[in-house]
Image (spheres, rainbow, N blue to C red):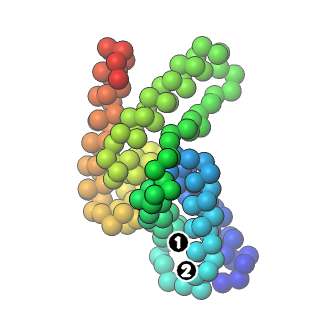
Amino acid sequence: MNQTEFLKTVIPFKDKVFRLAKRLLTSTEEAEDATQELYFKLWKNKSQLKNYRSIEAFAMTMTKNYCFDRLKSKQASNLSLVHSNYQEKGTPLQRQIELNDSVSIIEKLIEELPKQQKIIIQMRDIEQYEFEEIAEMLNLNPNTVRVSLSRARKTIREKLTKQHNYGVS
């Protein structure tokens, strides 16, 4: 695989790799480093990429594993959530503040989920992967993915409803 073929193969999903890394690491700098490291590893092993049914699924799996390794390392102990990527143009300031608050609350609730549910909700609801693709990337049964996603959404919905009804977190 030459450089042009490699780039045509991996560039289409680079943003998904970055977003998954950012969801897991919660730091833009760490996510950028993870993305760069992943692409370096893919380039180093480019001759073997044709052996994979889905290079994108392979890359997402590599990203997940790399991020988990980073989180386990001593350097990752000071990572914190600083991310909000939702902004609507032309929205009145008050509504924009409310939307940002809601997004922040949902992000906080996602961060409180168990690790597997957090990854599944990221891959399905944000990255728009199909259940079978997620199952393949995480070495799970598609039904397990569906159940886990359902539980994650239910947990978020219940906590969000409670917070909106009672104004407490």
For the residue marked with disc 2, what is the amino acid?
Answer: Leu
* Residue in the foreground of this view, choosing between 134 and 38: 38
Quarter where residue 90 is shown: top right
Quick check: 44 above or below 99? below
Residue 123 placed where, x, y %? Answer: 45, 52
Disc 1 secondary structure class:
helix
Q: Could you tell me which residue is drawn at 73 percent across and 76 percent down?
A: 4
Quick check: 142 above or below 25? below
Question: Can residue 115 be seen by looking at this rendering?
Answer: yes
Disc 2 secondary structure class:
helix
Quarter where residue 48 is shown: bottom right
Q: Neighbour class for label 1 at 10 Å: few (<14), some, many (≥20)?
A: some
Q: Could you tell me which residue is drawn at 68 percent across and 70 percent down?
A: 8
Question: Can residue 15 be seen by looking at this rendering?
Answer: no
* Residue in the foreground of this view, choosing between 59 and 26: 26
Residue 138 placed where, x, y %? Answer: 36, 63
Residue 3 placed where, x, y %? Answer: 72, 78
* Residue 49: numbered disc: 2
Q: Could you tell me which residue is drawn at 37 percent across and 56 percent down?
A: 131
* Residue 45: numbered disc: none
Quarter where residue 44 is shown: bottom right
Q: Could you tell me which residue is drawn at 41 percent across and 59 percent down?
A: 72
Pointer 1 residue:
55
* Residue in the foreground of this view, choosing between 105 and 13: 105
